[in-house]
Image (cartoon, rainbow, N blue to C red):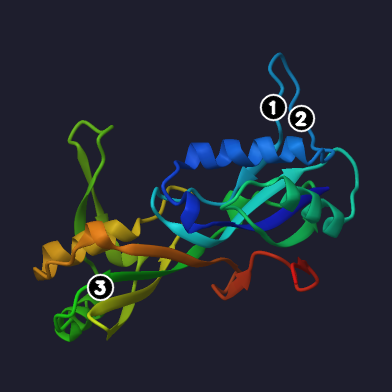
Amino acid sequence: MKLRLQITKDRDIRFISHLEYVRTLGRAIRRAKLPAAYSEGFNPHLKYSLASALGVGVVSYTEFVEIELAEEMDVEEAALKLSKALPRGIRVLAADAVENNAPALMAVAAGAEYRVTLPYDKDLRNAVHAFNSVDVLNFKKAAPKTKAGFKEVDVKFYIPKISFKQFDGKTEFNFTCKITPTGSMKAVDLLNALNETYDLGLPVEMADIERMKLYRTDRNGKKLPMLNENAWIKK
């Protein structure tokens, strides 16, 4: 069986890298003494994976890790054991069991919902309306490993619509971002694209970015939760 868990990346650890986050989970799985499966070969490793990489500095309440177990185990018991073994900054919120032949998390994650808050009180109505009205918005995204040093992406392919509200000198953006097998788009890239296209002067370096939800979709594009309805949820 595979154990699928909803976990967090809290503010305490928001600035650790994705790789360190993954390693931290691996150490916790070992400390929890779960009957985790290992790969075969000269250098066997734990069989576990995450749904989608999270950028440095981003808080998340909806990360998902999938652990392949070598033997059956009660979902609640496994979730509680892992919870006790995790360090500050990572919490287990829910857990479910899936078959070993179920599609991998990275294959089923279709999109994420974000909330981005930053100190900004200028009128955004025209810019947001313009963004939501266009079909295509190309942006040169930094790509240091490429020969050109950047790659051009269509922001609207990943983020078709944004909404916002303003309060106490702050602006809060809310949007859904598509996740594909070939990649996704970072919230900071959206903010940079808005600055470049509409000359807004958003203080990107001061943005508080939160991933609120991760979801999969059915054949018709309907959003579905990553866990089943009967999943164990921490009280």
Which class describes the residues within 10 Å of circle 1: few (<14), some (14-19), or many (20+)?
few
Instruction: Give the SS element for disc 2.
Output: loop
Dots 1 and 2: beta carbons under 8 Å? yes
Q: Is residue 180 visible?
A: no
Q: Amino acid at mark 1?
A: His
Viewer-side residue, 32 vs 2: 32
Q: Residue at x 50, y 60 (%)?
A: 60
Rendered location of residue 168, percent (x, y):
26, 83
Instruction: Give the structural element (helix, strand or loop) at label 3.
Output: loop
State which mark lies toward you, 2 or 3.
2
Closer mark to the observer between disc 3 and disc 1: 1
**Would you say the residues marked 3 and 1 are in contact, meaning their CB atoms lie under 8 Å apart?**
no
Residue 122, horizontal then vertical, whole percent: 14, 80
> Mark 1 sits on what residue?
45
Residue highlighted by disc 2:
38
Residue receiving disc 3:
135
Residue in view at x 79 percent, y 55 percent? 80
Q: CA distance from mark 1 to mark 2?
A: 5 Å
The residue lying at 70 percent from left, 56 percent from top is 5
